[in-house]
C-alpha cells in the first residue's frame, strides 16, 4: 500500500503545482494573496482523516468526484461562519447584500467548482490523463459528516492529500483535500511513475529519450 | 455601421450567481445590450429557437445537457452563431473539443476582463 520515497515526492510535487494554480485562481477571484501550506499525503482511516480536519466545528464544503484512470474525491472546505465573507469577496458589489445570503450556497458551489477544476486541470496535464467530473455538491456539517466517515466501514482506508490555504487580510482559512480509495492506488502509482520517467527524460525501462 | 449597438446575449449557466455576475459585467460595459438567461441546455435550446442571440455564453458542466452537447445542437441549426464556452473545466481535452466545435474557450473565474473578451468576440465579427 505504501508509496516509495520518489513516488511520494513526485505526488506531493504534482499536488503542490495543482494547489498553486488553484490558489492563483482563488487569488484572482477575491483580489487577495492566498497563502498555502506545504501539502501532505497520508494513509488513514476515514475517521482519522476527519479528525485531522477538526471535529469540533461545523464546516461548509464543496465536493466533486473526478474519474480517470483512478477516482479522486476533491473537497474544498471552509469554516461555516466564514463562507459568507468568502462569497462577498468573490462577488464584491455585483449583488446587493440582502440577496447575498440567499445565494451563499450557490456562490460557494461555484467557487468550489472553479478552484477544484483548476487543481484537477493541472493534475490532468501533469499525469497526461483526462478526468470526467461529477457536478459539484454542497455539504454542511462536522468533518465526519462532510467526509462521509460514518457511512464507511471502520477499517476503510483512504489516501489523503491535504493543503491548507489562508486569506491573510480577512483571516480566512480553508483546506483542499483529495481522497483516493486505496483500491485505486496501483493505477495512481502507474501515473506517478509515468510522470517521474518523463521528468527524468527516460522511459519505464530507464532508457533516455 | 456601429457594431457596438443593440446586441443580444444569451447566458447559459446552472449557477445563478454566475449568471448574475456575467449579466452585471455586460450591463456595466454595454448597458444598451439585451441580455437573457437560461439555467440549462434544454432551456437554452428553446430560447435560441424563440429568438436568435448574437452571442451565447455557455457553461460546460451542467445537469442534464452538458455545455458541449448544447453547443453541438445549437451549431447544427445555426452554424455561424458565436458561442463562448465559459468554464471552470480547463483540461486540454475540453478545450480541444470546444475548439473542434468552433467554440471560443474561456476560463472562469468570471471577471470584467473575461467579459471584455466575450464582448470583443461579437463586436469584431
Image (spheres, rainbow, N blue to C red):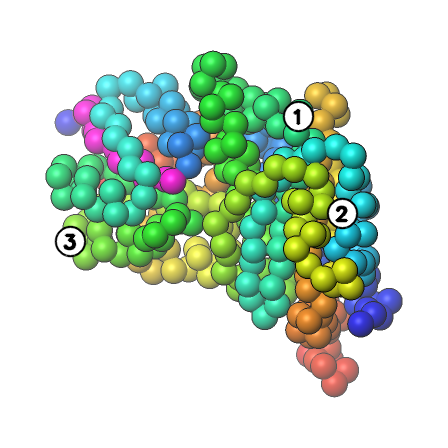
Q: In this image, B107 relative to B99: left or right?
A: right
* Pointer 3 and pointer 1 on the same chain: no
The chain holding disc 1 is A
The chain holding disc 2 is A
Q: What residue would you read off at disc 2? A: A50
**Residue A198 visible:** no
Placement of A140 over or under B93, stated as above or below:
above
Q: Residue at x 45, y 18 (%)?
A: A99
The chain holding disc 3 is B
> In x, y percent, where is residue A30?
60, 27
Secondary structure of residue under mark 2: helix
> In x, y percent, where is residue A140?
61, 37
Q: Would residue B3 be counted in the magenta stretch?
A: yes
Q: What residue would you read off at disc 1? A: A82
Q: Residue at x 24, y 24 (%)?
A: B33
> Distance of mark 1 from mark 2, alpha carbons?
19 Å
Q: What residue would you read off at disc 3? A: B77
Q: In this image, A122 relative to A17: left or right?
A: left
> Distance of mark 3 from mark 1, alpha carbons?
46 Å
Amino acid at each position: 500500500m505504501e508509496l516509495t520515497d520518489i513516488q511520494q515526492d513526485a505526488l506531493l510535487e504534482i499536488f503542490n503545482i495543482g494547489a498553486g494554480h488553484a490558489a492563483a485562481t482563488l487569488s484572482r477571484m477575491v483580489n487577495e494573496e492566498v497563502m498555502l501550506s506545504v501539502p501532505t499525503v497520508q494513509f488513514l482511516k476515514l475517521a482519522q482523516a476527519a479528525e485531522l480536519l477538526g471535529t469540533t466545528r461545523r464546516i461548509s464544503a464543496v465536493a466533486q468526484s473526478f474519474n480517470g484512470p483512478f477516482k479522486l474525491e476533491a473537497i474544498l472546505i471552509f469554516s461555516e461562519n466564514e463562507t459568507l465573507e468568502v462569497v462577498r469577496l468573490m462577488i464584491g458589489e455585483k449583488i446587493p447584500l440582502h440577496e447575498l445570503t440567499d445565494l451563499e450556497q450557490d456562490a460557494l458551489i461555484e467557487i468550489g467548482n472553479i478552484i477544484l477544476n483548476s487543481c484537477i486541470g493541472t493534475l490532468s496535464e501533469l499525469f497526461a490523463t483526462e478526468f470526467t467530473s461529477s457536478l459539484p455538491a454542497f455539504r454542511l456539517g462536522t468533518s465526519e459528516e462532510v467526509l462521509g466517515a460514518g457511512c464507511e466501514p471502520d477499517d476503510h482506508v483512504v489516501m489523503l492529500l491535504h493543503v491548507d490555504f489562508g486569506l491573510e487580510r480577512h483571516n480566512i482559512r480553508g483546506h483542499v483535500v483529495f481522497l483516493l480509495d486505496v483500491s485505486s492506488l496501483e493505477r495512481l502509482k502507474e501515473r506517478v511513475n509515468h510522470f517521474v520517467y518523463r521528468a527524468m527524460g527516460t522511459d519505464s525501462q530507464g532508457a533516455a529519450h | 455601421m456601429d457594431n457596438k449597438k443593440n446586441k443580444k446575449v444569451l447566458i447559459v449557466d446552472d449557477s445563478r450567481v454566475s449568471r448574475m455576475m456575467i449579466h452585471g459585467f455586460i450591463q456595466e460595459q454595454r448597458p444598451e445590450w439585451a441580455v437573457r438567461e437560461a439555467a440549462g441546455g434544454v432551456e437554452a435550446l428553446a430560447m435560441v429557437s424563440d429568438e436568435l442571440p448574437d452571442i451565447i455564453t455557455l457553461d460546460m458542466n451542467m445537469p442534464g445537457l452538458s455545455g458541449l452537447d448544447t453547443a453541438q445542437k445549437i451549431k447544427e441549426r445555426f452554424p455561424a452563431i458565436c458561442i463562448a464556452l465559459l468554464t471552470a473545466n480547463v483540461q486540454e481535452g475540453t478545450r480541444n473539443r470546444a475548439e473542434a466545435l468552433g467554440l471560443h474557450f474561456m476560463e472562469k473565474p468570471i471577471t470584467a476582463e473575461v467579459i471584455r473578451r466575450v464582448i470583443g468576440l461579437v463586436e469584431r465579427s
